[in-house]
Amino acid sequence: MGMVKIAARDAAMTFLWVGCASTLRPLTANLFSYLQPRPPLALLLRTTIVFLLRYIFISIGKFLGGASFNPAITTTFYAAGLGRGSLFSLAIRFPAQ
């Protein structure tokens, strides 16, 4: 039952990430049309927005007990031996992400 909960949390995180990441382009377009920054500042603003979004989602993932929206994170930690899961848990979590 624990694996199902983790997979459900991963699926919820992925759903939220796709929903938020798909709004990055319109968000930056509206923000840049209002602020009209020069190119170096525009890059800094984009980087800051993406950094904040990633930080928020990593915090949400920790709050949800280690949920992840990125399958590369789960796979890398398993391959390095740092994850607390097994190959079976990886097989359950991967499709949800």
Image (tube, rainbow, N blue to C red):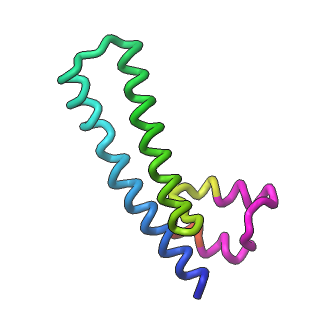
Q: Does the magenta stretch include residue 1?
A: no
Single out the residue that lies furthest toward the left. 34
Single out the residue that lies furthest toward the bottom. 1
**Residue 84 appears left or right of 3:** right
As drawn, 23 above or below 72: above
Span colored in magenta: 74-92
**Residue at the spot x=20%, y=31% of the render?**
30
Instruction: Return the x and y of residue 47 as percentages of the image width and height.
Output: 45, 29
As drawn, 42 above or below 12: above
Instruction: Return the x and y of residue 71 as percentages of the image width and height.
Output: 58, 58
**Residue at the spot x=41%, y=13% of the render?**
40
* Number of dots carrying numbers: 0
**Residue 78 appears left or right of 64:** right
| Quadrant occupied by the N terminus | bottom right
Instruction: Return the x and y of residue 53 as percentages of the image width and height.
Output: 42, 44
**Residue 63 appears left or right of 34:** right
- Magenta stretch: helix, strand or loop mostly: helix
Quarter location, residue 41: top left
Which is more toward the observer, 60 or 80?
60
Q: Is residue 86 magenta?
A: yes
**Residue at the spot x=37%, y=47% of the render?**
21
**Residue at the spot x=47%, y=53% of the render?**
57
